[in-house]
Amino acid sequence: MQALLDGNARFAKHQLTSCSNDLALLKQNTVAKQEPFAAVLSCADSRVPVELVFDQSIGQLFVTRVAGNIASPDIIASLEYGAAVLGTKAILVLGHANCGAVKAAMAGKAVPGQISALYAPIQPAVEAAGGNLEAAIKANAKNQANLLATASPVLAGLIQQGNLKVAAGYYALDTGTVTLL
C-alpha cells in the first residue's frame, strides 16, 4: 500500500518517475511473465488512469476495472489470480469523486441494456449514505473491499497468512490524491 501511496504523491505533485522508465526494457522483461506488486480494483471511468495515478509502469500493477468498482464474480476471480498466482501483496479498491455508477444507482432510474445490473451491488452503500454522493462512493469502496476480503476463500486465506492486504481508497479528481479509507 505504501508504494501505491508514494506513487500517488509523486503523481499529485507532477513529479512522475514512471515516464522515465525504459519502456522497451520493461516490455522485454515482462513478455514471459508478470510480477505485479499490487492489484487495483478501479472504476472504468476514463478520468481514473490507474497506472498514472500511482506512478507505475508496465508490469507493476494488476488492474481490474468495472463501473462502480464492484467485486463481481469475474473481478474476484481475476484478483484471486493476481494474488494466488502472480503474488500481488496488496489489493486496493479505488472509488473516485463524482462516480457516475454510484450516482446512477442513487437515482435508480430506468436505463437501457444491462446498465442497471450495476445498481444492486452498490445499493447497500447508497442506503448507508443518506443521499450523500461522496459518502456513498466511499461506503461502496469499503463494502467492495470487505467483500473481497471475506467472500473469497482464496483471498481470505492469503490475508490470514499475512501475505495479502486489502484496503479501500478514494481518488479525488480535482487534486489527484488518493486517501485510504
Image: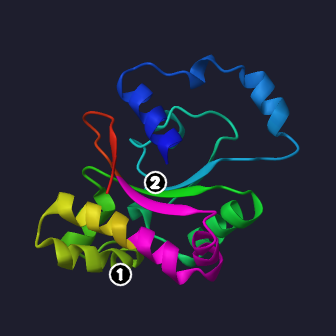
SS assignment at label 2: loop
Say the numbered circle drawn on residue 120.
Answer: 1
Q: Can you give x and y, in whole percent of width and height, for residue 128 in the image?
A: 19, 77
Reply above or below: 90 against 37: below
Q: Can you give x and y, in whole percent of width and height, for residue 113 in the image?
A: 42, 73
Residue drawn at x 36%, y 28% as measured from the top left: 12
Residue drawn at x 50%, y 80% as measured from the top left: 150
Q: Amino acid at mark 2?
A: Ala
Residue 30 visible from this viewpoint: yes
Q: Amino acid at mark 1?
A: Ala
Classify residue 104 as left or right of residue 157: left
Residue 114 visible from this viewpoint: no
Q: Can you give x and y, in whole percent of width and height, for residue 78 in the image?
A: 65, 66
Q: In this orientation, which residue lies closer to the viewer: 103 or 34?
A: 34
**Magenta span dominant secondary structure:** helix
Label whose residue precedes the other's in the sequence (1 or 2): 2
Residue drawn at x 19%, y 57% as measured from the top left: 134
